[in-house]
Amino acid sequence: MRKPTRFVGLDVHAETIAVAVAEPDGEVRSLGTIPNEAEAVRKLIRRLGPASSLRVCYEAGPCGYGLYWQLTGLGVECEVIAPTLIPVKTGDRVKTDRRDALKLARCYRSGDLTPVWVPDAAHEALRDLVRAREAAKKDQLRARHRVQKFLLRQGRRRPTKMHAWTQRHVAWLREQRWELVAAQTTFDDYLAEVDHAHARVARLERAISEQVATAPAHLKAVVGALQTLRGIGEVAAATIALEVGELSRFERPKQLMAYAGLVSGELSSGEHVSRGRITKTGNAHLRRVLVEAAWAYRHRPGLNGRLRHTVEGQSAAIRETAWKAQLRLHKRYAQLSARGKLHQKVIVAVARELLGFIWAVGVAAEREVSAQSQQRAA
């Protein structure tokens, strides 16, 4: 006879882990605090009983998934919980590690917690690389802003009909000279930081291309298929694939839209229905890439040089879906703009619908890879 399941809640920190267990008979009790060390976790599992009778959960946070991988390696069923979806009592004003662990164990037993998708180590490493490139782009923008603000304070403006940060603009910047040594030193330092940021972004983008080329077949196929959509290059496609994981784990596109935080918030009661701004409660990295890509659908549908090259080698179904996306989303942009909607709202609406096409293209690519694998196995 199988032993009744015990539900364990862990409040994980860098140095300690607060432990609580919900017993099968209804009792929820604290087991104190243990060090956040592999040996201490193994001793805890041995003390609580057979691994097959345990279900463990902890909140997603800065400590990552190391504890998850250790527990699953020990044969324990473990889930990482989305922190923003944990029930909160409005009248509860006391928050401690012990109470958090007790709440996790109690809510986990009642089924009120929502787990997150956990990537494997290779997937997480590649995702970190993509996020490092995103951080480098932000640093590059800050470095450029410092140069522009310095020139503005000094009363120097670039010549007309010269776009910012083109080769002509950079050459003009390098020609600038100041009489005061302090001013010249400051400007040279700002400009050197811009060069450093540019080199850093280029280095990371090359690394992403190399890693995508050697990635597993299903990830490589999804990244290639997503590039058939307008506004999505290799880096954007890799970001989408790595932030979402397997697109087929979402049964419908609307679930993926909610995951990205692109659905409208709602406060309705009775017959009164009130919808507001997008929730923004999903993956911020994914949402940023989608909004940037949506701006490409301002233009008329067409196949430029890059798109013409990327659609080669893709299946007819994927090419047809990508072309439908261009027709649909450009029409949607034109309709909403003609109604006088703000451009930002129009772009968000286009980004939400673009995510539906991303789901269709990604699922089709995953199915094609799965079918090819089955054929080779047969």
Image (tube, helix red, strand yellow):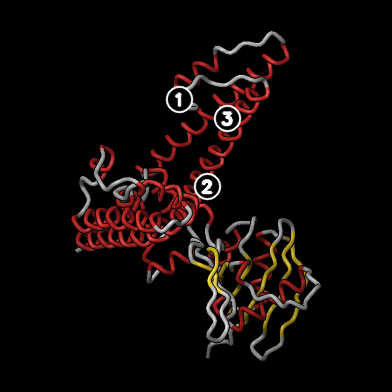
138, above or below 151, in the image:
below
Disc number lying in front (1 or 2): 1
Of 157 and 374, the residue lying toward us: 157
Assess disc 2: are there few (<14), some (14-19) or many (≥20) residues with their C-alpha within 10 Å of its C-alpha: some
Q: Nearer the viewer, residue 72 or 212?
A: 212
- How crowded pointer 1 is (Cα within 10 Å; few <14, some 14-19, many 20+) is rated as few
> Residue at coordinates 64% horizontally, 19% vertically from top-left?
187
Residue 77 visible, this orientation? no
Q: Quadrant of residue 15?
A: bottom right
Q: Which residue is mark 1?
A: 166
- Give the answer, above or below, for where 160 lies relative to 290: above
> What amino acid type should be assigned to the residue bearing mark 2?
Asp
Location of mark 3 (residue)? 144
| Amino acid beneath label 1 | Thr
Q: Quadrant of residue 53?
A: bottom right
The disc labelled 3 sits on which kind of residue? Answer: Arg
Q: How far separated are the C-alphas under marks 2 and 3? A: 24 Å
Q: Which residue is mark 2?
A: 128
Q: Position of residue 228 (x, y in %)?
A: 29, 49
